[in-house]
Amino acid sequence: MIEISGSFWIVLTGVLATASCGLLGTFLVLRKMSLLGDALSHAVLPGIAIAFLLSGSRAIVPMFLGATLFGLVTTLLVEAFHKKWQVQEDASIGVVFTALFALGVVLITAFAGQVDLDQECVLYGEIAYTPWDLLLWGEYSLGPRPVWILGGVLAVNLLLVTLFYKELKIASFDPAMAVSVGINATLIHYLLMAMVSLTTVASFESVGAILVVAMLIVPGATAYLWSDRLEVVIGLAMFFGMSSAVVGYYLASYWDSSIAGAMVVVVGGIFLFSLLFSPNQGVLSRLWQRLQLSLQVAQDHMLLALVRRDEEVEERARLRPDELVGSAAVLGILAQMAFRRLRWRRLLQQVDGMVELSAAGEQVALGLLRKHRLWETYMNRLGLPEDHVHAPADVIEHFISAELEAELGAEVGDERDPQGKQIPPSG
C-alpha cells in the first residue's frame, strides 16, 4: 500500500481551498463586491459559535448550517440597508460584518469553556494538522476529512458555475440586461452568496478566515490585470491561488512560519508582480505605453513642423536640429530620443548641419498634415468656429486610423481647410 506523505495532504488542502476561493472571488471582484467576501468570511463566525453551543460538538453538519445561515443573513442585511434604507453599500457592509463578527468573538470568549472552539483557530486555521484529521469509515481511514470537504465544495462550485455561467456572467456585467432577458438577477446573486458562504465555512477549520479573505479577493484581482476575458480570468485566478498554496507551503517550511500566512504572502507577491509587469494594466507597461506615445507625438510634431515650413517657403525647408527638437512639445530628453528615432527610420536627412525631410519622411508628414486638416474641416462643418478647430485636431491627428481617414475624406472631400489651406491628397 502506497503511503502518502503529510506534506501532500497539506498542499492538496491548500490547493482545493484556494481554487474554490479563486473561482468565486473572480465574480466578487467583477461585481465590485470584494468587501462582501471579507464580510461573509467574518460574519459567519457567530453562526459557527451558536452551532457549537447548540450541538455541543464539532460535527460538520451543524457548523455548516449555522455558518451558512449567518452568511445569508449577512447578505440580506446588507441588501436591506443599501436598498431599503439608502445606506451606502460599503458602509452597510462595514456595519453588518463588524457587528456580526464582534458578536461571534463575544460568544466564543464567553462560552469557550463549554465548547471546543478557539477564535485563533477560526481566524488563522491550522492546515498543518490536516494529515491527522481523518475521515473514518468504520475502522478504515478514507484520508483527511478537510480534503473530502474542500474537494466536495470545489466540485459543487465548479458544477454551479458551469451550469449558470451565462447567467452569472450577464448578471455580473449588467444586472438590468439580465432582468430584461429573463434572468432572475436576485436569485443569481443569492446563489453566489450561498456558494461563497459554503466555501468560507468549509475552509475555516483548515486554513482560517484570513486565508479565505485573501483568496476570495487577491487571485481574482490579480487575474483581471492580465486579461479582459472572463473565462481566462477565472482560469488565471484559480491558477494563481493554487500556485500560492504550493509555493506558500514550501516557503513556510523554509521560514518555519504559519503555512496559511505564507500562502497569503505568496499570492500577495504574485499580485505585486502583476501590478508591475502585466502587459495591459501593469504600472511599468503603462509607463512604457506612455513613453511610446510621447515619442510618437514628438516625431509627428517634428515632421509637421518641416512640412508646414515647406509650404511657407515653397521648397524643401531646412531647420537647425535644435529648432526641430524644440518643436516636439515634449520634454527635452524625449524630444532628443524622437529626433534620433526619425533619423534611424530615415525620415530625416542632414545637409550641411541642417535637417530636412527625406522623400519617405515627406510622404509620412503629408499624411499627418492631411489627417490634421481633414479633422479641422470636419469639426468646422459641425459648427465649431474656424479659430477653435486647430487645438482639437492637434490632439486627434496622432490617433486617426486609415479607415477613419478614408471616411473623413469621403465626408469633407479633398478641398481646403477652414483657414483656406490645401488638404494634401490621399496617398
Image (cartoon, rainbow, N blue to C red):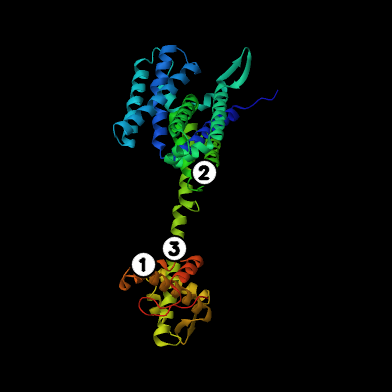
Residue at x 50%, y 53% (from the top left corner): 279
**Rendered image: mark on residue 230:** 2
**Separation of residues labelled 3 and 2 (CA atoms):** 30 Å
How far apart marks 2 and 1 lie (CA) works out to: 40 Å
Tag 2, which secondary structure? helix
Q: Position of residue 259 (x, y in %)?
A: 50, 32
Question: Which one is earlier in the sequence, the residue at label 2 or at label 1?
Answer: 2
Residue nearer the viewer, 21 or 380: 380
CA gap, disc 1 to disc 3?
33 Å
Name the one closer to the observer, 418 or 22.
Answer: 418
Contact, CB < 8 Å: mark 2 with mark 1? no
Where does label 1 land, which residue? 382
139 above or below 17?
A: above
The label shown at residue 54 is: none
Residue 73 visible at all: yes
Within 10 angstroms of label 3, few (less than 14), some, or many (20 or more) residues? few
- Nearer to us of marks 3 and 2 is 2
Q: Are marks 3 and 2 in contact (CB under 8 Å)?
A: no
In the image, residue 24 sits, relative to residue 316, either above or below, namely above
Question: Which amino acid type is shown beneath numbered disc 3?
Answer: Leu
Q: Is residue 74 above or below residue 89?
A: above
Callout 1, which amino acid? Leu
Q: Residue at x 47, y 77 (%)?
A: 366
Element under disc 3: helix
Contact flag, marks 1 and 3 (Cβ < 8 Å): no
Is any atom of residue 249 visible in this view? Answer: no
Q: Nearer the viewer, residue 20 or 230?
A: 230
Which disc number belongs to residue 291? Answer: 3
